[in-house]
Amino acid sequence: MQTATQALPSSRTALWAGRIIGALAIVFLIFDSVIKVLKLAPAVESTTQLGYPETLVITIGIIELICLAVYVIPRTSIFGAILMTGYLGGAIATNLRAETPLFNVVFPIIIGALLWGGIYLRDDKLRALIPLRR
C-alpha cells in the first residue's frame, strides 16, 4: 500500500530562516576548508594533533570544499548534505578516537543539524518526505 505525500509550500519566513540557518553552517565550513587548503598553522596543528599527517591537510580541505560546493548548489543540496554528513561523521569519529573535549565532538553535530535544518525549512519535498508530527 502506498501513501501519497504532498509537499506543503514553504512560507516566506521558513524559506528565509532556512537560508539563514544554512548560511551559518556554510560560512563556518568555508572558513574551515580555506584554512586547510591554505595550510595555515592552526589547521596544520589541529590536524596533526588528531593523528593525521601534515601532507593530508590540503586534501582534507579540498574534499570539504567539494562537498560544500555540492551542498550550495540548490539542485544538489540534499546530495551535498549527505556528503557533508559523511564528512562530519568522520570528524566526530576522529575526535572521539583522539579523546578530545566534548565540544569538539558535539560541534560537527551542530553544524550537520544546521545544514539539514536549513534544507528542511527550504525544501517542500523534503518536508513532505520527513514530516514532523504534532
Image (cartoon, rainbow, N blue to C red):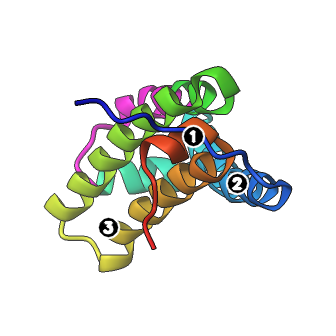
User: In the rendered structure, which disc, 2 or 3, sits on the residue that comes first in sequence?
Assistant: 2
Q: Which residue is mark 1?
A: 33
The tag earlier along the polypeptide, 3 or 1, is 1
N-terminal of the two: label 1 or label 2?
Answer: 2
Residue appearing at x 64%, y 46% in the figure: 8
* Mark 2 lies on residue: 18
Q: Which residues are magenta?
A: 50-65
In three-dimensional space, the C-alpha distance between marks 1 and 2, rounded to whole angstroms, equals 22 Å
The quadrant of the image that shows the N terminus is: top left
Q: Amino acid at mark 3?
A: Val
- Residue 133 is left or right of residue 91, and the answer is right
Q: Main secondary structure of the magenta part?
A: helix
Q: Quadrant of residue 25?
A: bottom right
**Residue lying farthest to the front in this orientation:** 1
Residue situated furthest right in the rendering = 12
- Element at label 3: helix
**Disc 3: CA contacts within 10 A as few (<14), some (14-19) or many (>=20):** some
> Gap in Å between the C-alphas at discs 3 and 1?
18 Å
Residue 87 against residue 67 in the figure, above or below:
below
